[in-house]
Amino acid sequence: MREMRAILVEELGEPERLRIADRPVPQPGPGQIRVDIAVAGVNFMDTGARRLGAATGDLPFVPGVEGAGRVSELGEGVTEFTVGDRVAWVYAYGSYAEQIVLPAADAVPVPDDISDEIAASLMMQGITAHHFVTEAADVRPGQVAVVHAAAGGLGQKLTQLVKARGGKVIGIVSSEQKAETARDGGADHTVVSTGDAFVGPVLELTDGEGVDVVFDGGGETTFRASMEVLRRHGLLLYYGAVIGAVPVVNMRELPHSIKVSYPVFRDHIPTREALLRHSADLFDLVRRNILIPDIGRRYPLDGAAQAHRDIESRTTTGKLLLFP
Ligand SMILES: NC(=O)c1ccc[n+]([C@@H]2O[C@H](COP(=O)([O-])OP(=O)(O)OC[C@H]3O[C@@H](n4cnc5c(N)ncnc54)[C@H](OP(=O)(O)O)[C@@H]3O)[C@@H](O)[C@H]2O)c1
């Protein structure tokens, strides 16, 4: 039996649980393709899977849900790809590995002028940011947004897409160094804050009015403060369930007739047609230099544990990638 190298989680817990192992090369079934992985993306949600288990419930499991590479084998009935095609994907467990099998219907063809690194870095954070500024928040010209973790992989993309729609961005970051990164990425203003310290500075920057929309992936420590910086009828998008405890809200606590949403990126790509359309939009935004994905750190496959330590210790900016 042919073998490949993969990261395996046999027990849930700390980053040390991410161990390199030899695994059988997966075989594609009907409607599936096997891909030789060039790059795998690291996402904050992977740390949740490592600690709490994968959404599939399997143990052991190969973590990672995103990547880019070349098709190396076709399962029965697959007609939309040929061996050698470049593809990218999101939400396919098994991505921290040399090879993966996934449904052909979940693979996105990667155009020649888009590198594997860029394609992999767009699939989770790019589609999510696209979802948040379009269907979830529908950001309009002149609106002001607060973006939490504005130097992070998702935060930078949110910033650039809000700006592309004519909005202004106040980026919240945890250090002066990250503030510089967030401004380089397009933020109009930055506030250095952890917890709720950003409320005063954001209200000051908006003459006490508050902002139109807050993008908050920060967990319970920022949630209530995010409500306080919204103007009347403002919108809070909350997506920080992996980072911290999920806030419990009494409806009567909501100030200024604000709206609260828990957007899930899968709702943006419910069909293959939507996945292809939104991916094509993102590739085009990169081509036009509107979206400039920042690769923060690159790791070999056996550096997965270090990548998790880094993202959990708030020391990273931009997208983190693993190279099998
Ligand atoms: N709902 C969805 O569809 C969806 C999709 C993708 C991602 N997400 C969520 O979006 C958030 C960002 O994900 P990402 O993968 O793009 O990661 P990321 O933003 O590149 O990195 C995480 C950043 O979060 C900030 N952070 C705030 N509190 C933290 C804490 N207690 N521990 C560690 N970091 C903390 C840190 O920035 P500062 O140091 O500047 O605060 C850190 O650099 C996560 O909550 C993730 O689960 C949700």
Image (spheres, rainbow, N blue to C red):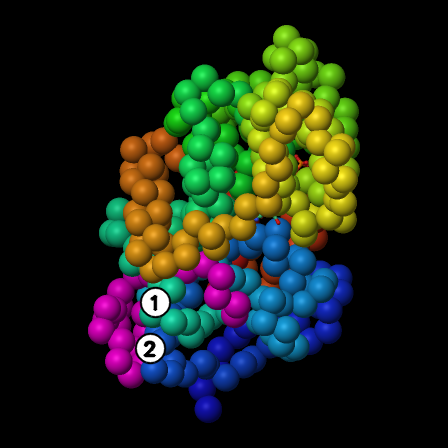
Where is residue 57 drawn, in percent x and y?
Answer: 63, 73
In the image, taking residue 251 as reference, residue 132 lies left or right, namely: left
Main SS, magenta region, reads loop
In the image, taking residue 70 as reference, residue 65 lies left or right, namely: right
What segment is highlighted magenta in the picture?
Answer: 71-94
Q: Secondary structure at mark 2?
A: loop
Where is residue 154 drawn, in percent x and y?
Answer: 53, 41
Where is residue 207 drawn, in percent x and y?
Answer: 64, 8
**Residue on which disc 2 sits:** 31
Q: CA distance from mark 1 to mark 2?
A: 8 Å
| Residues packed near mark 1 inside 10 Å, few (<14), some (14 to 19) or many (20 plus) | some
Where is residue 37 drawn, in percent x and y?
Answer: 42, 65
Whether 41 is drawn above or below 101: the answer is: above
For badge 1, the amino acid type reads Ala
User: Ligand 1 is located in which of the four quadrants?
Assistant: top right
Residue drawn at 35 percent across, 43 percent down:
282
Asked if the magenta segment contains residue 79, the reply would be yes
For badge 2, the amino acid type reads Gly
Q: Are marks 1 and 2 in contact (CB under 8 Å)?
A: yes
Q: Is residue 19 visible?
A: no
Residue 105: numbered disc: 1
Asked if the magenta segment contains residue 247, the reply would be no
Whether 322 is drawn above or below 250: the answer is: below
Question: Which one is in front, 303 or 79?
Answer: 79
Question: Which one is in front, 179 or 78?
Answer: 78
